Image (cartoon, grey):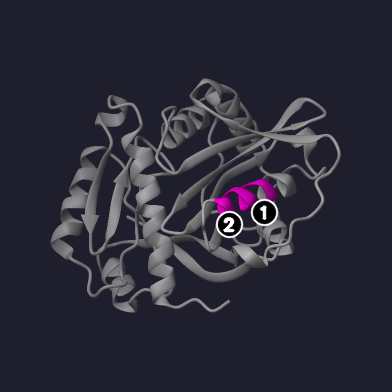
Amino acid sequence: MFADATLAARIDRAEARLCSRLALSAPAATGGGPFVLPLSGGLAVYAGPRSPMNKVIGVGFDGPLDTGELTTVEQRWTDRNEPVRVELSILSDPAVAVALSGRGYALHGFENVLAARIGDIGRPAIAPGIAIDIVGEDGFEQWLSLAVDSFANMDGTGSTADPVLPREELERVVRDAMGTAAVPGLTRYVAYLDGEPAGEAALHVEDGLALLAGSGTVPRFRGRGVQKALVARRIDDAAAAGCDLAVVVTSPGTRSQANVMRRGFELLYTRAILVR
């Protein structure tokens, strides 16, 4: 699959809108309150202290960086003692990276954006004993517990830009990032293996895109087909919603990347993570 700047902008800006909706669903008292600011065709999103939703994304596709808008973003982040994090597609205008470097932004890491056409993704047989439920607001605490258990025990593969937080802080940022309230287009899932909660995931449908996000498996259930089942269920739901493309963002070289590539996902482009 070939990715050009138009497709990259479509994907990055869909993720920007998801981040903004999640941020604005976070508790208003957290870290002075969430906010979203426009920036050069993309969005600058602040959800709360050290939240993974805190990012600038979707910039660099429509012309030069608006330094006036960026100065406003930087000041708002400084007021909250938060470093500004930019996730910049390698398909964006190279002048944007040059401008950011000149303002003191440093390379912090990378993330890969992978995609597959919905109709081209095979539907593997689901391992016996696995069942998947959609989670409403009343099941959020169970979903959160599974997410924290999964992210607190990463498999140690590949290159990751951010260290794992202490468990209490990880629970706070995941709670703030994913929101307890309903978010338009977002569905949360819990997978059970032989009746025990084993993993979780999320799906966001936006602009014909299916963004597969937030998936994890509790360590003792890994290697038993839970993630394969969660991917298959989300692809089925995305197809039913009329999506044409499924997208996954992973750290480079991780087992997560290998797993989705085995399902037919291809690497489209990389984002550089720049921090000031």
The relative height of residue 272 versus residue 64 in the rendered view (above or below) is above
Q: Chief secondary structure of the magenta span? A: helix
The residue nearer to you, when weighing 122 against 191, is 122
Q: Does 25 appear above or below 112?
A: above
Query: Which quarter of the picture shows residue 259?
Result: bottom right
Q: Is residue 188 left or right of residue 5?
A: right
Residue range in magenta is 232-240
In the displayed structure, 255 sits above or below 5; it is above
Amino acid beneath label 2:
Ser
Residues at discs 1 and 2 in contact (Cβ within 8 Å): yes
Q: In which quarter of the image is the N terminus?
A: bottom right
Between the C-alphas of marks 1 and 2, the distance is: 8 Å
On screen, residue 252 versus residue 270, left or right, reads right
Classify 10 Å Cα crowding around label 1: few (below 14), some (14-19), many (20 and above): some
Q: What residue is disc 1 on?
A: 256
- Tell me if residue 219 can be seen: yes
Q: Name the residue under label 2.
A: 251
Q: Where is residue 174 in the image (x, y as percent from the top left)?
A: 49, 34
List x then y, in percent, for residue 257: 66, 59
In the rendered image, the residue lying farthest to the left is: 68
The mark nearer the N terminus, 1 or 2, is 2
Q: Nearer the viewer, mark 1 or mark 2?
A: 1
Residue density around tag 2, few if under 14, some if 14–19, many if 20 or more, within 10 Å: many
Residue 238 forms part of the magenta stretch: yes
Q: Picture coordinates of residue 17 (x, y %)?
A: 35, 51
Q: Secondary structure under badge 2? A: loop
Taking 22 as reference, is 253 left or right? right
